[in-house]
Image: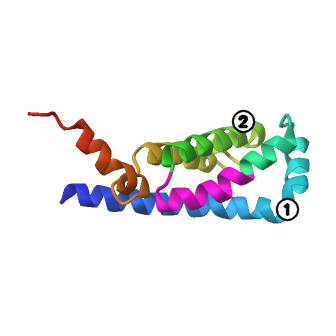
Amino acid sequence: MYARIQDVAALIGRIAVGVVFLAHGLDKWNAGIDGTAQMLGAVGIPLPTVAAVFIIAVEVVGSILFIVGLATPLVGIGYAVVGLGATFAVHLDAGLTGEGGYELVLLLALTGLALGFNSGRLALDHVLLGRRSSKEAEPVS
């Protein structure tokens, strides 16, 4: 029973983190690649157009995959890269807490990373790959 609770908790966590990243990604999607690249260039991000495409892909496409539990380790790494980039490029000078602080950005990035590698059995990764892997891992008698 405890495993079921863990799986439900991981699902709820994936949905929550995925929805927050998706909301931010849709803002960038609406601004477009050029608008997002201009914003990134203004804060000193190198190769702002490449970064804009990467960030929009992670936050929009990655979030949809994360919510359903597909390619979660890859998306989790993407969340960590995006979140740590935002922490160091935008929020670090404001400190950990307070207006513009990095506590929530850092928390989302690292929670996404942790859930990416611990997505639970209610994830498509587990449904599509987990059962096969567990059968392969069983010792032959």
Number of callouts: 2
Q: CA distance from mark 2 to mark 1?
A: 22 Å
Q: Name the mark nearer the viewer: 2 or 1.
A: 1
Q: Is residue 116 left or right of residue 88?
A: left
Task: Please tell me which residue lies in front, 120 or 2.
Answer: 120
Q: Residues within 10 Å of mark 1 (few under 14, many from 20)?
A: some
Residue 133 position in % (x across, y down)? 31, 42
Q: Quadrant for residue 92, please give it.
A: top right
As helix, strand or loop, the secondary structure at mark 2 comes to: helix
Q: Is residue 120 magenta?
A: no
The answer to whether one can see residue 136 in this image is yes
Q: Position of residue 44 (x, y in %)?
A: 87, 36
What secondary structure is found at the residue carrying circle 1? helix
**Of 12 and 49, which appears nearest the observer?**
49
Q: Earlier in the sequence, mark 2 or mark 1?
A: 1
Prevailing secondary structure class for the magenta stretch in the rendered image: helix
Left or right, residue 67 beside residue 94: left
Q: Amino acid at mark 1?
A: Ala
- Residue under the image location 16 percent in, 33 percent down: 139
Could you say which is closer to the camera, residue 101 or residue 51? 51
Q: Is residue 99 left or right of residue 134?
A: right
The residue lying at 79 percent from left, 42 percent from top is: 51
Query: Disc 2 designates what residue?
Result: 88
Q: Residue furthest front?
A: 141
Q: Which mark is residue 43?
A: none
Q: In what quadrant of the picture does the C terminus appear?
A: top left
Whole-percent x, y for residue 76 in the image: 54, 45
The correct choice, above or below, for 135 with respect to 4 in the image is above
Q: Is residue 59 covered in magenta?
A: yes
User: What's drawn in magenta, residue-wise?
Assistant: 56-70
Question: Is 95 or 39 nearer to us in this picture?
Answer: 39
Q: Which residue is mark 1?
A: 31
